Image (cartoon, rainbow, N blue to C red):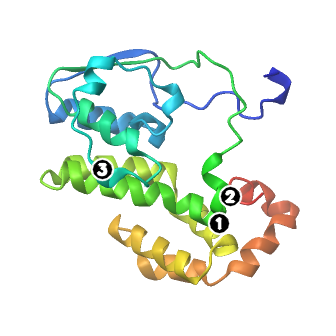
């Protein structure tokens, strides 16, 4: 991999430098989640993880996560919620990669967006349904990864009616205004057109390629 080819050479998972975290209680976990900038901070990117094999093997895997694209995150979250869990966050990448060849886009951009919601909302419910504060902190990480306006505009451009409906329902579960989401979704053609307007390019470049 050539450095010249890398358009986004480094994206931080957390808003901290290198740090060793010890998770003895839910407050420790909530503080960590509040520092996450991306679902990468809650283990979405498998290639960035180094895990002790005995900790991994000790987890009783939930087969319902097969097909979610994030089965490994169930294991990692199970470890994360174990009292005394240690996590050493290294802020700078140890391996350089381009990172723009997303295999999850095989079924289209709209489906790629929904993948994150399907898995991470399931994780939130399975792990934190009895702790509203921690559940909200976990869901906020998903909202940082998928900001409602950028994501809804992208879905307006690329999604079919079913995919748009699903996104609206997912954001409603996250506490977003469903009427606002649906209003943005109705302007799919307009959203796609603005990518060619110079003044708006910077606003849309994160979601429309």
Query: Which structural element holds mark 1?
Result: helix
Residue 130 vertical placement versus 81 (above, below): below
Query: Quarter holding the C terminus?
Result: bottom right
Mark 2 touches mark 1? (CB < 8 Å): yes
Q: Nearer the viewer, residue 171 or 48?
A: 48
Asked if one can make out residue 113 in the rendered structure from this viewpoint, the answer is yes
Which is more foreground, mark 3 or mark 2? 3
Q: Residue drawn 52% across and 81% down?
A: 182
Q: Position of residue 11 (x, y in %)?
A: 60, 32
Q: Residue drawn 26% across and 47% down?
A: 62
Q: Position of residue 4 (x, y in %)?
A: 85, 25
Using the numbered discs, state the Cα–Cα distance from disc 3 to disc 2 in whole angstroms.
33 Å
Q: Nearer the viewer, residue 47 or 27?
A: 47
Residue 188 vertical placement versus 127 (above, below): below
Asked if one can make out residue 21 in the rendered structure from this viewpoint, the answer is no
Query: Which structural element holds mark 2?
Result: loop
Using the numbered discs, state the Cα–Cα distance from disc 1 to disc 3 in whole angstroms.
31 Å
User: Mark 2 vs mark 1: which is more N-terminal?
Assistant: 1
User: Mark 3 vs mark 2: which is more N-terminal?
Assistant: 3
Query: Which structural element holds mark 3?
Result: helix
Q: Position of residue 80 (x, y in %)?
A: 26, 31
Q: Which residue is mark 1?
A: 154
Using the numbered discs, state the Cα–Cα distance from disc 2 to disc 1 in whole angstroms.
5 Å
**In this picture, residue 5 sits left or right of residue 118:** right
**In this picture, residue 91 sits left or right of residue 199:** left
Q: Position of residue 82 (x, y in %)?
A: 17, 29
Q: Which residue is mark 2?
A: 207
Residue 167: give its label: none
The image quadrant that residue 178 belongs to is: bottom left
Q: Nearer the viewer, residue 41 or 103?
A: 103
Q: Which residue is mark 3?
A: 63
Counting other residues with Cα less than 10 Å from the Cα at mark 3, is it few (<14), some (14-19), or many (20 or more)? few
């Amino acid at each position: 991999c050539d450095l010249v080819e890398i358009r986004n050479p480094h994206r931080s998972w957390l808003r901290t430098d290198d740090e060793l975290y010890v998770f003895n209680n839910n407050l420790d976990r909530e503080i960590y989640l509040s520092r996450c900038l991306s679902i990468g901070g809650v283990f979405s990117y498998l290639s960035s993880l180094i895990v002790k094999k005995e900790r991994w093997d000790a987890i009783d895997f939930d087969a319902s996560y097969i097909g979610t694209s994030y089965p490994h995150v169930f294991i990692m979250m199970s470890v994360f919620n174990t009292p005394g869990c240690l996590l050493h966050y290294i802020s700078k990448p140890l391996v350089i990669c381009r990172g723009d060849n997303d295999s999850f886009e095989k079924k289209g951009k709209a489906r790629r967006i929904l993948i994150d919601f399907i898995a991470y909302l399931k994780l939130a419910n399975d792990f934190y349904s009895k702790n509203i504060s921690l559940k909200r902190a976990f869901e906020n990480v998903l909202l940082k990864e998928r900001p409602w306006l950028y994501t809804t505009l992208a879905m307006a451009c690329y999604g079919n009616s079913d995919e748009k409906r699903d996104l609206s329902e997912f954001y409603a579960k996250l506490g977003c205004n469903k009427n606002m989401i649906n209003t943005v979704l109705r302007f799919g053609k307009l959203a796609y057109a603005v990518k060619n307007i110079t003044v708006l390019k910077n606003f849309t470049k994160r979601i429309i390629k």
